[in-house]
Image: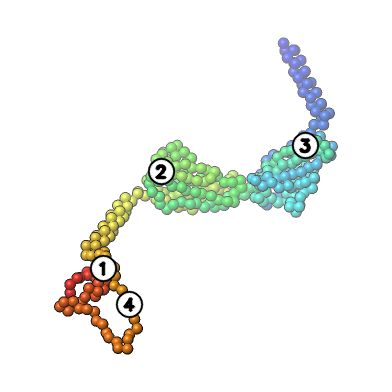
Amino acid sequence: MGTKAQADRKLLHLFILAILLCSLALGSVTVHSSEPEVRIPENNPVKLSCAYSGFSSPRVEWKFDQGDTTKLVCYNNKITASYEDRVTFLPSGITFKSVTREDTGTYTCMVSEEGGNNYGEVKVKLIVLVPPSKPTVSIPSSATIGNRAVLTCSEKDGSPPSEYTWFKDGIVMPTNPKSTRAFSNSSYVLNPTTGELVFDPLSASDTGEYSCEARNGYGTPMTSNAVRMEAVERNVGVIVAAVLVTLILLGILIFGIWFAYSRGHFDSKYLTSSKKVIYSQPSARSEVSMPALGRGGLPGAGVRRFLAHVYVFWGLSAKEDY
């Protein structure tokens, strides 16, 4: 049995070797990189390797992808104009004289046969290392208990992007508040990637000084300034007082309208007058016409209406008798 198993293994090895020899005979090609991921500090030189075999007349091109941006670095074995001042081409790869954080991304080495159908490619990820800067935070000085409170922490320089750790009164806040006794009474969600800390709802025990730390595995972690947040009760007294003041003002307004109406200030005989005033050229013999006096020397009806309008204008009570 053992001899038969050894014979079967030998046949399998011969079969695999035959396949490999056939692939080479048919012109099989390979493209690979000795370093698929390269990490290098900013402002340092770096080489991205690309090795290939099976091409009789290889044509090499490199492209760069970063998010939605794609750039051609090398075309037909020549560096493009936008990179020629700081990148050199070799059959074994491309070399940057000095890299910046903007060079972080994915580089693809594409090899094809000049005038043929053979093609192969390999991707190399370049990460330019930049330490994080001091993060900035947005923390409310006070927030109402029972409401939602959002705290944010961010920094823009770190490469790769930083991850964030929050502290309350100098104590590290775990991702799950229920995992430690110190934060078991809190209800929050902490996202270490975005740096957002959300309390929903906020409780009285969440009062304290908050700060955050940014780190990306390169350089020294940086910590923000500490900011105190007070968790305050909803001020019911102020709301009740505001409602009472509104009701009092509304009552005064209604009483004022009623008082004015009861004193006759809205009576139509005080607000309208049908008397017309006609002006004409005086005759040669001018006569001065005085308002007719009523019985007992009292002013006539027209004068009384005029005086009523005056009283209304000055907020006084119009009187029918004088």
Quarter of the image for the C terminus: give it. bottom left
Residue corresponding to mark 3: 119
Neighbor class of circle 3 (other Cα within 10 Å; few <14, some 14-19, many 20+) is some
Rendered image: mark on residue 278: 4
**Residue under pointer 2:** 201
Residue 292 is at least partly visible in this image: yes
* Residue drawn at the location 26% of the way across and 61% of the way down: 257
Q: Amino acid at mark 1?
A: Tyr
Q: Amino acid at mark 4?
A: Ile
Mark 2 against mark 1, which lies toward the viewer?
1
Left or right for 220, reference 173: right
* Above or below, comparing residue 13 to residue 217 in the picture: above
Name which of mark 2 and mark 1 comes first in the sequence.
2
Q: Viewed as shown, does residue 288 lie left or right of 75?
A: left
Calculate the distance from the C-alpha at mark 3 to the C-alpha at mark 4: 108 Å
The N terminus - image quarter: top right
Q: Secondary structure at mark 2?
A: loop
User: Residue 58: where, in percent of width, then height?
Assistant: 81, 40
How far is mark 2 from mark 3, CA to CA?
58 Å
Distance of label 4 from label 2 (alpha carbons): 77 Å
Q: Earlier in the sequence, mark 3 or mark 4?
A: 3
Assign a secondary structure to mark 1.
helix
Query: Observer-nearest residue: 138 or 287?
Result: 287
Q: Is residue 302 above or below residue 74?
A: below
Earlier in the chain: of badge 4 and badge 2, it is 2
Give how far across and how far down residue 55 sits, in percent. 82, 36
Residue with the mark numbered 1: 270
Q: Position of residue 20 (x, y in %)?
A: 79, 26
Determine the CA span between mark 2 and mark 1.
62 Å
Q: How many badges with numbers are in the image?
A: 4
Check whether the beta carbons of the residues at disc 2 and disc 1 lie within 8 A of each other: no
What kind of residue is marked 2? Pro
